[in-house]
C-alpha cells in the first residue's frame, strides 16, 4: 500500500502466508550479536555454529560403576588399591599388574588401566576382586573424544538454546555461546473501557458495572515470554481510545524498539485508531486485515522510525490467533530463528465430530485421550463467539482450522493449554 493511503474498512483481506512474506520482505532480521556465559543464554538464538572447543572426554571415562583394570590381567584375582572419584581428572593411583581401582560412572580412568569390569561381574574377597572372564581393552569405557570431537558442530546457527542443551553442553566444557541480541518489543493495549486490576474487590465491582479488565495484552506478553524467549517485552502500557495520546506514545516512546504490538484499535469503528494513526504518521501500511475468522482486523505498518507496528484484535482468543498464525513467525524471522524450542502448536488431534469453516479460524475444544489417540471435541458454535470469553475455561486447547470442511477422525493442529483427560478404553467400557 502507498504511504498515507489507509483504508478505513477491511476491504481486501490478506492470506496469512502472504502477510508474513510481505513483512519478511520489508523487515530485516536483527544482526547484532553478543557472547554470553552459557547459563545465561537459555532461550537465545545462536549467531554462529556452536562447536566443541575440545576433544571430550580429554581422557577415558568409566561407562559403568566397577573396577578399572588392565585387560591382560583378566580373568584373575586383583588387589583393590583405591578409588577414582568422579569429578577429578588427576588420579593419585596408577593401575599396575595385579591391581585394580574402583571407579564410578563418569570417573576418569587412572593411568595404566585400559578397561572397566562392572561391579556386578566381580566377587569380593578380603580386599581383592575375582574376575572370572576376559575383558577386552576399551570395554565399558568412553574413550577420548567419544562425546565430542574438537571443532565438531554441536548446534547450528539459528537454533534456540534450550535448558536441556545447556545441560549437555556444560557437561563437555562448552561454557559460552555467541547469540543474537534480544528483540525489543513494546505492547500498547488500547481501550477506554479497559482497566488494570489492582485488587480482587475493586476488579469485581468495576467489571459488574461494565468496565473490562485488560487481559489481551497480558496474554500476548505471556505468549512471547513462554514461546519466543529470544524476544523481550520492554514495556506494556494501557491507553484510552484517544488518537492524540496513542500517536504521542508511538512518536516518542518507540525509539530503541524493534516491534510495537497494539491490541485493540484495529477495526473500522469510530474508536479504532489504526487507520487514523497510519494516516497521521504517514506510516507504510503493509496490509489491513487478514483472511481469517477470529483476528480478521490484524494489520501491520512500518512507522517512520523504521519500527514495525503490528495491530492485533482486542479480543483475547482472536489476538492469540494472530500470535499463533502470524506474530510467532514474525518474531522467528526477526530473531533469525531456524529452529525454536517449545512450539506453541504442540500436536494434532483427531476430530470427534464434523467441523465446517469458511476461512482459517481458532476453534476452542475439549481434549481427551481415547485408545492412545488425542481426540478433540469442538465446543458448540455459540460458545466460540469472541464475546463469550468465559468459554476459554471450558476448553482444553485451540484447534487451528484451515479448510472449509472436516470429517470425524481427521487430524487438526492443536495448541494444548490444559492436560487432556484420559477416557476409559473400549475394552474397559466393555
Image (cartoon, rainbow, N blue to C red):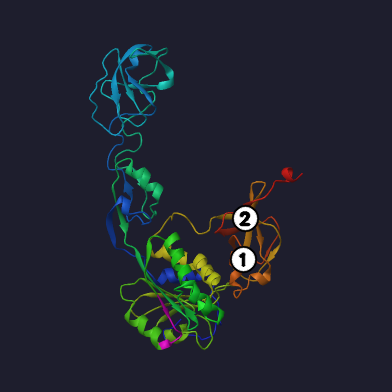
The residues colored magenta run 237-243
The answer to whether residue 209 is left or right of residue 140 is right
Q: Which mark is residue 363?
A: 1
User: 60 or 24, which is in the foreground?
Assistant: 60
The image quarter in which residue 284 lies: bottom left
Q: Residue furthest front?
A: 201
Q: Is residue 420 above or below residue 247?
A: above
Q: Quadrant of the C terminus?
A: top right
User: 21 or 271, which is in the foreground?
Assistant: 271
Mark 2 — residue?
A: 349
Residue 204 percent across, percent down from the top left: 53, 75
Q: Is residue 162 above or below residue 383?
A: above
Q: Which residue is painted at 62% across and 64% down in the image? A: 394
**Mark 2 or mark 1, earlier in chain:** 2
The answer to whether residue 187 is left or right of residue 402 is left
Q: Residue furthest right?
A: 430
Residue 141 visible in the current orientation: yes
**For the residue labelled by badge 1, is the local secondary structure a helix, a strand or a loop?**
strand
Amino acid at each position: 500500500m502507498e504511504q498515507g493511503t489507509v483504508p478505513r474498512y477491511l476491504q481486501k483481506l490478506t492470506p496469512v502466508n502472504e502477510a508474513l512474506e510481505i513483512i519478511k520482505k520489508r523487515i530485516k532480521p536483527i544482526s547484532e550479536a553478543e557472547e554470553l556465559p552459557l547459563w545465561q543464554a537459555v532461550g537465545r538464538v545462536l549467531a554462529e555454529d556452536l562447536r566443541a572447543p575440545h576433544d571430550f572426554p580429554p581422557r577415558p571415562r568409566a561407562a559403568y560403576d566397577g573396577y578399572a583394570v588392565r585387560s591382560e590381567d583378566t580373568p584373575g584375582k586383583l588387589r583393590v588399591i583405591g578409588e577414582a572419584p568422579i569429578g577429578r581428572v588427576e588420579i593419585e593411583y596408577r593401575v599396575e599388574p595385579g591391581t585394580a581401582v574402583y571407579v564410578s560412572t563418569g570417573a576418569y580412568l587412572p593411568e595404566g588401566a585400559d578397561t572397566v569390569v562392572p561391579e556386578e561381574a566381580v566377587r569380593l574377597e578380603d580386599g581383592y576382586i575375582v574376575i572370572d572372564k576376559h575383558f577386552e581393552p576399551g570395554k565399558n569405557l568412553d574413550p577420548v573424544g567419544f562425546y565430542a570431537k574438537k571443532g565438531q558442530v554441536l548446534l547450528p546457527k539459528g537454533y534456540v538454546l534450550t535448558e536441556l542443551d545447556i545441560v549437555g553442553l556444560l557437561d563437555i566444557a562448552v561454557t559460552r555461546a555467541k547469540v543474537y541480541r534480544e528483540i525489543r518489543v513494546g505492547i500498547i493495549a488500547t481501550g477506554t473501557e479497559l482497566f488494570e486490576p489492582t485488587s480482587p474487590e475493586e476488579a469485581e465491582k468495576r467489571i459488574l458495572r461494565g468496565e473490562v479488565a485488560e487481559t489481551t495484552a497480558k496474554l500476548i506478553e505471556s505468549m512471547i515470554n513462554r514461546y519466543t524467549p529470544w524476544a523481550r517485552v520492554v514495556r506494556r502500557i494501557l491507553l484510552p481510545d484517544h488518537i492524540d495520546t496513542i500517536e504521542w506514545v508511538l512518536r516518542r516512546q518507540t525509539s530503541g524498539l524493534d516491534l510495537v504490538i497494539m491490541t485493540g484499535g484495529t477495526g473500522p469503528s469510530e474508536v479504532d485508531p489504526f487507520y487514523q494513526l497510519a494516516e497521521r504518521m504517514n506510516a507504510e501500511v503493509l496490509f489491513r486485515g487478514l483472511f481469517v475468522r477470529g483476528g480478521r482486523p490484524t494489520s501491520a505498518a512500518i512507522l517512520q522510525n523504521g519500527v514495525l507496528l503490528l495491530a492485533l484484535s482486542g479480543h483475547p482468543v482472536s489476538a492469540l490467533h494472530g500470535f499463533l498464525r502470524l506474530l510467532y513467525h514474525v518474531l522467528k524471522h526477526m530473531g533469525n530463528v531456524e529452529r525454536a524450542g517449545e512450539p506453541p502448536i504442540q500436536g494434532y488431534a483427531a476430530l470427534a465430530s464434523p467441523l465446517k469453516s469458511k476461512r482459517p479460524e481458532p476453534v476452542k475444544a475439549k481434549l481427551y485421550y481415547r485408545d492412545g489417540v488425542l481426540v478433540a471435541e469442538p465446543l458448540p458454535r455459540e460458545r466460540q463467539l469472541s464475546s463469550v470469553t468465559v468459554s476459554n475455561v471450558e476448553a482444553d486447547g485451540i484447534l487451528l482450522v484451515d479448510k472449509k470442511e472436516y470429517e470425524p477422525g481427521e487430524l487438526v493442529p492443536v495448541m494444548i493449554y490444559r492436560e487432556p483427560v484420559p477416557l476409559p478404553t473400549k475394552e474397559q467400557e466393555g
